[in-house]
Amino acid sequence: MLLGEGEAVAAKRRLLERAGARIVGEEQGAALAVAGPDVPEPRVAALRAAGVLVNAVDRPHLCDWTLPAIVERGSVLVAVGTGGVSAGLAAALRQRLELLLPAGLGGVADALGAARAALRARFPDAGERRRAIGALTAPGAPLDPLADQPAPAAALDRALAGLAAEGSRVERVAVRSADPDALTLRAARLLSQADRVVHAPDMPAAILERARADADRLSPPLPAPPPPGLSVLLEWKP
């Protein structure tokens, strides 16, 4: 259901229709509603009381749900939301991402999707498969998602021909500040790629949050021999 008039409501209509939403009238019993700035608060309250989930434009205190700013590149969809706190900030981030993400990014996703069976057969272990895809999509790699990819399927075929299962790799990172923004680029990159993070109990939580959410957290020492994949040994040296 779409209520109200004006450009803000028209913009919401375009976004909803592009997403495949079916917009119905109030009498048809919609489950979701978008209320424009000209819709009075009592009407919004009545809709919510009736069980309708409402997005009230520019009135986050009346919103049950929000619409993110969206960047589309074929099969790739990036949504930026602030929970209704600042639509302007979400829009600014979307504009930056529009410049950053190449037009052919959707083709990279399609190529990886088409190669799913081949990747699964080549790397039956889920961890090895994830590391292989990480190697294929790393900066400067054949499927670097931030580089122009005129023929991603062909690039993937060539890369798979020479791709081998990754062995064990151990990296040490000295942490000298509890501020995660003080991490070096190398340290931040290693944490984002690590399969496991080895650290003492006094390692600041803010640093550990920079590691992949599904990475194992282990107390030292690292098992010998090291398990397959990337192990990052964090050393707290303030």
Image (spheres, rainbow, N blue to C red):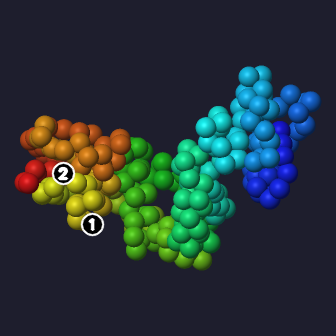
Chain-order first, disc 2 or disc 1: 2
Quarter of the picture containing the N terminus is: top right
Residue carrying label 2: 178
**In x, y percent, where is residue 209?**
30, 46
Choose between 207 and 235: the one closer to the eye. Answer: 207
The answer to whether residue 236 shows anywhere in this view is yes
Amino acid under label 2? Ala
Mark 2 crowd level (few <14, some 14–19, many ≥20, 10 Å Cα): some
Q: What label does residue 65 carry, if any?
A: none
Q: Residue at x 8, y 54 (%)?
A: 238
Choose between 214 and 78: the one closer to the eye. Answer: 78
Q: Residue at x 41, y 51 (%)?
A: 130
Left-right relation of 167 to 5: left
Height in image: 154 above or below 28?
below
**In x, y percent, where is residue 82?**
54, 49
Question: Could you tell me if the residues under marks 2 and 1 are in contact, i.e. CB atoms within 8 Å?
Answer: no
Number of marks in the image? 2
Left-right relation of 19 to 204: right
Height in image: 227 above or below 91?
above
Q: Residue at x 76, y 52 (%)?
A: 12
**In x, y percent, where is residue 63?**
65, 37
Choose between 121 and 112: the one closer to the eye. Answer: 112
Mark 1 crowd level (few <14, some 14–19, many ≥20, 10 Å Cα): few
Left-right relation of 213 to 26: left
Q: Residue at x 27, y 66 (%)?
A: 185
Q: In whole angstroms, how far apart are the C-alphas of marks 2 and 1?
A: 15 Å
Left-right relation of 48 to 175: right
Q: Quadrant of residue 218?
A: top left
Residue carrying label 1: 185
